[in-house]
């Protein structure tokens, strides 16, 4: 499952949408567990913070960061499901964004929980 979070102008609508993603994840758990038994299963969230996971110093909508928290929590709770949050810079074109999402789907490193893509390239956080 790949959830593509739209850019919102209305914070209330965005907050409502984020709640729906939490409920959707709850409903998908059984299906994703079954799918993982047959092969690969994934839960990806894609949002537009700033392409650098909020670390660039530029303004971004912190509410959207809730998707990253959800995805990282599910990564621990659903060990058989490949979970990752992707931050795509809003100024990247659609074709480039799609290529980055597909690249993440095929990334063999399951230890990475979140990645960002901007004009500077791919970034991850090291803890």
Image (tube, rainbow, N blue to C red):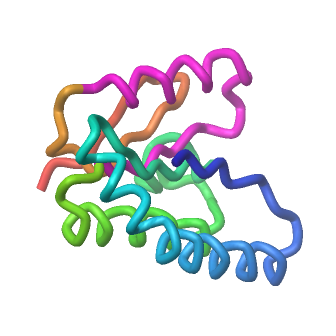
Residue visible at 50% across and 29% down? 101
Q: Nearer the viewer, residue 18 or 126?
A: 18
Left or right, 20 with respect to 10, comes to left
Residue visible at 61% across and 74% down? 63
Query: On the image, which quarter does residue 29 sit in?
Result: bottom left
Circle count? 0
Q: Looking at the picture, how far across and down is residue 30, in whole percent?
A: 39, 67
Residue 78 drawn above or below residue 87: below
Q: Looking at the picture, how far across and down is residue 6, in whole percent?
A: 76, 53
Q: Looking at the picture, how far across and down is residue 20, in whole percent?
A: 67, 76
Residue 5 drawn above or below residue 24: above
Residue visible at 39% across and 30% down? 105
Q: Nearer the viewer, residue 114 or 71?
A: 71
Find out whether residue 73 is within the magenta segment.
no
Left or right, 76 with respect to 86, comes to left
Q: Looking at the picture, how far across and down is residue 5, in whole percent?
A: 68, 54
* Residue projecting furthest to the right: 10
- In magenta, the rendered stretch is 82-107
Residue visible at 61% across and 23% down? 98
Residue 114 drawn above or below residue 74: above
The quadrant of the rendering that contains the C terminus is bottom left
Find out whether residue 98 is within the magenta segment.
yes
């Amino acid at each position: 499952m790949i959830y593509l979070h739209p850019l919102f102008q209305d914070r209330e609508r965005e907050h409502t949408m984020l709640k729906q993603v939490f409920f959707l994840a709850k409903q998908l758990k059984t299906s994703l567990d079954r799918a993982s038994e047959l092969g690969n299963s994934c839960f990806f969230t894609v949002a537009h913070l700033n392409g650098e996971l909020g670390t660039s110093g530029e303004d971004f909508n912190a509410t959207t960061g809730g998707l990253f928290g959800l995805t990282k929590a599910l990564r621990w709770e659903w060990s058989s499901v490949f979970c990752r949050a992707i931050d795509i810079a809003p100024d990247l074109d659609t074709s480039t964004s799609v290529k980055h999402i597909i690249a993440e789907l095929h990334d063999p490193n399951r230890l990475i929980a979140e990645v960002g893509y901007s004009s500077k390239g791919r970034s991850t956080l090291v803890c």
